Amino acid sequence: MGEYVIKLPDIGEGVAEAEVVEWMVTAGDVVHEDQVLVSVMTDKAAVELPSPTTGTVISLGAQVGEMLAVGAELLRLEVSGAGNIEAVSPRPAPAAAASDEASPATSESEMPAAEPTASEKTASTPATPVPAAGPPPSSTEDRRPEPPRAHTASRDEVGTETRSEAAFDPAPPRPEGEKPIAAPAVRHRARNAGVDLRFVSGSGPAGRITHADLDRVLARAPQTSPDRPTDDSRSAVDTPKRTGETPQTPLEPIKLSGLRRAMCTRMQDAWSRIPHISYVEEIDVTSLESLRARLNERYASTHPRLTLLPFLMRAICLAAREHPDLNATFDDEQGVLMRSPAVHIGVATQTDAGLLVPVVRDVQSRDPWSCARAVESLAETARSGRAGRDVLSGSTITITSLGALGGVVTTPIINPPEVAIVGVNRIRTLPVYVGDSLMPRKMMNLSSSFDHRVIDGHSAASFIQAIRALLEEPALLFIEPPREVHRPGAA
């Protein structure tokens, strides 16, 4: 019998870590090859991981809700034969240390206090010197306020401070022009913490910097807050005085996990990194709604019911021909805008677990009924929890629709690395002048957002105006725009 270690695989698309969402097995279970072991959540999608072999579960590498880096031990099996225990690296410590000196894994309670060496005493000396005892200066001009005297640190305190400051040893800077490799969420955390990732060593594949690497640096950084309030002052500030108040009901802490946690990270990262420009336009959809009703009545028995969404998807495809920069993704690390010849539209879908964006691919080749079938099928897949990476990735532009819930204006957040998102608001019947006559018309707002780093206001407005023209004259949605033909002898 031998032991077989299963590690978190490289799921692809720049994923450096994943959260354990649900274990399908427990210690002592017998598992077979290709049996699903665990469901993990990346910042893009939920992924089920199967077993590569048959064996008995010895231990699980993480609990539900914990984050694991790519390459970390996921599960350990007892198998017949020699196993693979000699071929794999030992299970990493929680801090993902590269060496004992760089990341001491022993906790304070486990490490016996030792007499500090002379160099350690020097490292643990307070930054503010304590003046030697002696007569005060004779000159009034040379008199300075005496700094507060530091208390005499105990042996345990000296050992803690020594280890903290001695361990803070930033990595040498990378060569000129070489950028650190890290996921957007890691970069966002580093910016907020004031950490320069050029000086952080990465433990992930190809030197990728993970959350664990950043945590290690933040934990080692020397604390520089001399004016931190004491326990007494903190207590006085944090505890309000209440006279005659009835104690409030305690708050209920709810930990974000799984899809909700991934969505939280992505939305925060998108909002902090992307300068959004929003544009709202009012569209007369009276003719479109009339056409939609007639088509649904005529083909009710043979075709899926049409909503406004398939027509909007068709309009986006046609408008993108004139504005290809809007159907694109932006690599902000490389400074490259990637135009897509195909239109893959993500459709924001609310599920019990949170917001998912399944992707309808090659919309430019679909008719409205094909779009309707795809949207319905993908929405059902997403709501049932069966949506994988192939369903939730690869979109070039996104539609979000809150019209069924009401609301006339929204400011949607872009789904990176896309550069545009189109929001649909509810349809209202309003009095509108048509020529000289006041008539009831069905009006709808499109509330859209664009990445202002690569899309300027003129391009954003022109794109939405092109969509508006198509929706207000729905016959244009079914006519291929004429191509310019060069005539011999024409100037």
Image (cartoon, helix red, strand yellow):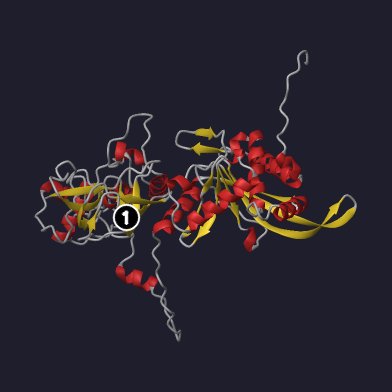
Question: In the drawing, does residue 68 fall left or right of residue 237?
Answer: left
Instruction: Give the residue displayed 73% in from the left and 30% down from the top.
Output: 482
**Closer to us: 432 or 169:** 432
Instruction: Give the residue displayed 71% in from the left and 58% down from the top.
Output: 427
Is residue 375 shown above or below 179?
below
Residue 439, position as x, y percentages in the image:
85, 57
**Residue 144 visible in the picture:** no
Instruction: Give the residue displayed 52% in from the left and 34% down from the top.
Output: 338
Q: Extreme front residue here?
A: 301
Q: Identify which amino acid the numbered label 1 is placed on.
A: Val
Question: In the drawing, does residue 465 fall left or right of residue 116?
Answer: right
Residue 151, position as x, y percentages in the image:
21, 62
* Residue 467 lies in quadrant: top right
* Residue 456 lies in quadrant: top right
Q: Extreme left residue here?
A: 115
* Residue 20 lies in quadrant: bottom left
In the rendered view of the protein, which quadrant contains the C terminus?
Answer: top right
Report the number of numbered marks.
1
**Closer to us: 440 or 418:** 440
Residue that mark 1 sits on? 38
Helix, strand or loop at disc 1? strand
Residue 306, position as x, y percentages in the image:
66, 53
**Residue 172 visible in the picture:** yes
